[in-house]
Amino acid sequence: MNRLAGWTLGLALMTGSLVLVGCAGPGAQMRPEQMADQVAALKKKAGSEEQNRLLMQAQAKQISDQKDYQVGPEDLLNVQFFGNDNLNREIRVNGQGEISLPLVGDIKVAGKSPLDIEKQLVKLYGSNYLKNPSITVNVKEYRHQRVSITGAVAKPGTYEMIGPKTLLEMLATAGGLQDHSAEKPGDFVQVIRNRSAAGIRQAAENPAAGQAPETLVIDLHQLLKQGDMSLNVPIRNGDIINVPFAGNAFVLGAVRKPGSIPVKGKLTVSQAIATAGGLDTILSTNKVTVVRYGPNGQPESIQVNLKRVIAQQEPDILLKDQDVVMAGEGQIRKALLIFREMVPGAATMGSRAIAAP
């Protein structure tokens, strides 16, 4: 093929490419069914980094003491009196949450930690019967306890909890966090529990506050990624652990890694683009379209100029569940890229044209 014929073929290919690009460009050119197919395919991808991190931290975290465990009915306590072995007892907590010991009689222990019970016994025996008593209390057998785990976990349900457990251990018992790309966990875990004794007293003093249960809100990012073990709270009998689902946005078009992104926290358009690997350096423009579906399923297009967003000349839009972010592809840039790849000897010219502002 001579040089003239080659250039003729190249121009014909470029013209055809422009026509094709016009049919599948970034705006309204992509048909709704094409977008739906891409979104459906993206929902099948990816796993959860939080899943492995959760399981590893749960295995690494072992409870070495019982200071946070609250004793309850049916627990078997081992009470040791140093230097007074005749007072030692293994005694089970009765249905009223009490134990009975020599000299002091019935003692309410339900809802108290072993350390609190030790202090209580030291005070009782030291005031009337023993001089500077040394008393230790350990839980020899734990009663069966129930904890419900719901939301974005692999195996939601109700679990038996024997002995002291932490939040991470119970989440691991439920198979860890959900790892389906379409159903990822959000940023927080809720631990819903009955009010403590102090909470009940406050509610009695202020009836308007009601008897609503307490809710602990745990930041998953801070716990799992930053390793803040102070958030790995002890779990109690009757607690409900709820892991809310995060929504998903979908990033398509001229980005390096198109895919689905959990809408956790305050996710903006520029953050979504960055999470998808950033804009394609050759094909992309600064024009981004956010397709948002209303309550009736009607799509709304929101135009964003990424360059102006980065320059803080226009707001960085917060994304919502099921938003589709389309990073625009320049039609001329795409056509010249195809021309460069298909026409021998045109690489230099194509690169200069594509790189031109």
Image (cartoon, rainbow, N blue to C red):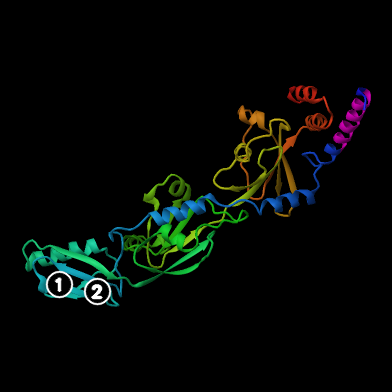
Magenta segment: does it hold 13?
yes
The residue lying at 16 percent from left, 68 percent from top is 80
Q: 15 or 305, which lies in front?
A: 15
Furthest toward the bottom, the residue is: 95
Point out the image quarter for the C terminus: top right
Q: Position of residue 231 (x, y in %)?
A: 39, 51
Which comes before the other along the chain, label 2 or label 1?
A: 1
The boundaries of the magenta stretch are 4-19
Q: Main secondary structure of the magenta part?
A: helix
Q: Are marks 2 and 1 in contact (CB under 8 Å)?
A: no
Amino acid at pointer 1: Asn
> Which residue is identified by label 1?
88
Determine crowd level at label 1: few under 14, some 14-19, many 20+ residues with C-alpha closer than 10 A. Answer: some
Would you say residue 17 is visible in this rendering? yes
Residue 250 x, y percent position in the rendering: 67, 46
Q: With respect to residue 207, does 88 lie above or below?
A: below
Residue behind mark 2: 98
Task: Say what secondary structure mark 2 lies in.
Answer: strand
Q: How far across and down, in percent of the image, does residue 294 sit?
A: 71, 51
Front residue of this view, candidates 319 and 158: 158
Q: Is residue 159 magenta?
A: no
- Disc 2 or disc 1, which is closer to the eye? 1
* Residue most extreme to the front: 1
Measured in 3D between alpha carbons, the distance from the residue under mark 2 to the one under mark 1, in whole angstroms, is 17 Å
Pick whichever, 183 or 337, lies toward us.
337
Residue 26 at what x, y percent from top left? Answer: 77, 39
Which label is found at residue 173?
none
144 w.r.t. 40: above or below: below
In this rendering, the answer to whether 238 lies above or below 329 is: below
Can residue 298 be seen in this snapshot? Answer: no
Which quadrant: the N terminus?
Answer: top right
